[in-house]
Image (cartoon, rainbow, N blue to C red):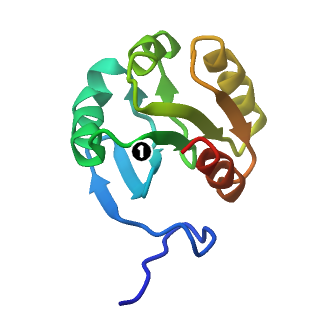
Amino acid sequence: MEKITLHNLPPDFQLKKRLETDIGMVYFYNGIVIFEANEGVVLSYKTGFSILLKGLNYLGTKPWVYISNRVHSYSIKPMDYKYLNKVPTLRAVGVVNYSEVGHTNAELEAKFCKKPFQMFDNLTEAAIWGKGYL
């Protein structure tokens, strides 16, 4: 069986499932969940709740790490981190930024997240970091 790779992650990261939604794509690499929002969306509890439920249903009781791979420009409501903070199986949150503005926005978001929160310049570093929380 051929290993599916999408993000050029190290060989021990195998893509298990891909979920296409109206606001973006979700990729499941064992316990690493990578989300890539579509250009211009507003990510909030309201717009992301159904995706979160589908993801939690797929993951079950296994621990997981959420990585936001910000390849497109979109808005997020940082106060809605209060909902992610309540998910017991979520171990950490990583944000991959490709711009200085994105980095500044993520610094603000970090103030609302009670889980371990880290910013990165590339997805591979984020995924390797996230594995340490599983």
Residue type pointed to by label 1: Asn
- Residue 110 lies left or right of residue 49; in this view the side is right
Relative depth, front residue between 6 and 117: 117
Relative depth, front residue between 46 and 125: 125
- Residue 16 lies left or right of residue 68; in this view the side is left
The residue under the point 63% across, 26% down is 116
Give the vertical position of 47 relative to 134 (above or below): above
Q: Secondary structure at mark 1?
A: loop
The image position of residue 104, as x and y in percent, is: 74, 24
Q: Mark 1: give few (<14), some (14-19) or many (20+) Cα within 10 Å.
A: some
Badge 1 is on which residue? 38
Q: Quadrant location of the C terminus?
A: top right
The number of numbered badges drawn on the structure is 1
The image position of residue 131, as x and y in percent, is: 60, 50
The residue under the point 24% across, 48% down is 58
- Residue 30 lies left or right of residue 57; in this view the side is right
The image quarter in which residue 87 lies: top left
Residue at the farthest bottom position: 1
